[in-house]
């Protein structure tokens, strides 16, 4: 009620206008008023009894007596009609204001409880996310790759990306375009120049293509192409071209991957090996993890005697910037099962892919 608030402000200049402060302030004020009235009366008494100790004593006694009388009783009996009417109006206003305050407070408490519940649910969500990420990182430690409900070590947004509606896909592309435009502007270019006009769109699409591996999973790629052949000799697919994106710099690294395995009766369709490599390469990667993920994925789906993966690549973030070692090659390997256990098997693999000779 704005009117009562205005009067509050006028009546209680010393009090804050907060809900709990307003009537407390008024009470304080009226008390002060009575006190000043009393002081005035004391002053009168003093002035009249200035010259007489006896009278001063009497006035002191008077003061004592007066302080023992209940103030409202005295005030109400003594006060003139106009003042009483004013007081009654004031009290009425205060009661109305208190009702409003009560309602406001109830609203506030309702809001607070709603906020609290929202906070609680947010906390719960955050906890759940933290737990999930913890369990994810645990899962990555234990069995790094395959997640049979779907996406083979999916990242947080991978499922949302996979299952998005067309309008959500458009919104994602738009956000990405905006980000690319920002990059163009930040390097000091004119983003509206003819040659750059469609670049955000092109780059956004390209980036989604570079990372399309997030939408794939190993089981779909293998698609049942596992055959019980009773074969147990080494199988090698070498020189698989890899184009991946370094997750530290978002620039490409490219190279060759060599995959070997020794079957345990079952063999996998030979074209599946490059496709598994491709799937993990089309994510934000580091070469070390990419190598390990490919090896683990093959090991999980095929359960062979062993898997060996070697990768050699050139990182643009190293070649084009930083140390600028243009001829350097980074090599990583992951040996599982018999390749890990037996150096003879491992050496056979390494000599067959001819890595040492390069
Ligand atoms: Zn890098």
Image (spheres, rainbow, N blue to C red):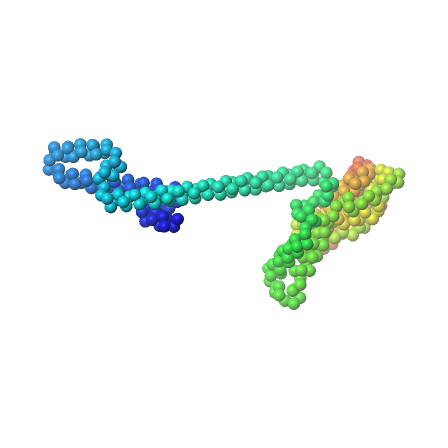
The residue furthest right is 230
Q: Is residue 315 above or below residue 80?
A: below
Q: Tell me: 99 left or right of 200.
A: left
Q: Position of residue 62 (x, y in %)?
A: 18, 33
Q: In the displayed structure, would residue 290 be above or below residue 71?
A: below
Q: Would you say 223 lies left or right of 206 here?
A: right
The tally of labels here is 0
Residue 293 image offset from top left, x and y in percent: 74, 43
Out of 292 and 74, give the one closest to the viewer: 74
* Residue found at the very far bottom of the displayed protein: 194
As drawn, is 93 to the left or to the right of 143? left
- Residue 223 sits in which quadrant? top right
Q: Residue at x 79, y 49 (%)?
A: 275
Q: Is residue 336 left or right of residue 154?
A: right
Question: Is residue 356 something that shows in the picture?
Answer: no
On the question of residue 211 being in view, the answer is yes
Most foreground residue, 15 or 104: 104
């Amino acid at each position: 009620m704005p009117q009562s608030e205005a009067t509050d402000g006028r009546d209680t200049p010393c009090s804050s206008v907060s809900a709990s402060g307003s009537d407390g302030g008024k009470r304080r004020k009226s008390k002060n008023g009575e006190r000043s009235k009393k002081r005035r009366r004391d002053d009168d008494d003093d002035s009249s009894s200035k010259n007489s100790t006896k009278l001063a004593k009497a006035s002191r006694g008077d003061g004592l007596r007066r302080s023992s009388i209940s103030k409202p009783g005295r005030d109400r009996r003594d006060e003139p009609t106009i003042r009483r009417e004013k007081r009654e109006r004031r009290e009425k206003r205060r009661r109305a204001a208190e009702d409003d305050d009560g309602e406001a407070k109830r609203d506030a408490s309702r809001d607070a409880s709603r906020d609290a519940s929202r906070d609680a649910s947010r906390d719960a969500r955050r906890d759940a996310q933290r737990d999930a990420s913890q369990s994810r990182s645990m899962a990555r430690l234990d069995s790094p790759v395959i997640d049979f409900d779907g996406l083979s070590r999916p990242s947080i947004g991978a499922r949302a990306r996979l299952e998005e509606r067309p309008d959500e896909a458009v919104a994602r592309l738009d956000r990405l375009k905006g980000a690319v435009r920002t990059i163009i502007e930040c390097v000091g270019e004119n983003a509206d120049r003819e040659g750059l006009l469609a670049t955000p769109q092109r780059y956004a699409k390209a980036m989604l293509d570079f990372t399309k591996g997030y939408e794939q999973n190993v089981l779909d790629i293998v698609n049942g192409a596992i055959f019980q052949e009773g074969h147990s000799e080494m199988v090698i697919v070498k020189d698989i071209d890899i184009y991946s994106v370094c997750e530290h710099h978002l620039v490409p690294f490219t190279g060759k991957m060599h995959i070997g395995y020794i079957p345990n009766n079952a063999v996998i369709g030979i074209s599946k090996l490059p496709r598994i490599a491709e799937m993990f390469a089309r994510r934000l990667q580091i070469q070390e993890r990419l190598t390990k993920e490919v090896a683990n994925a093959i090991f999980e789906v095929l359960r062979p005697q062993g898997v060996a993966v070697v990768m050699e690549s050139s990182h643009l973030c190293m070649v084009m910037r930083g140390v600028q070692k243009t001829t350097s090659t980074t090599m990583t390997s992951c040996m599982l099962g018999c390749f890990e256990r037996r150096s003879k098997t491992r050496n056979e693999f390494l000599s067959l892919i001819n890595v040492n000779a390069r």
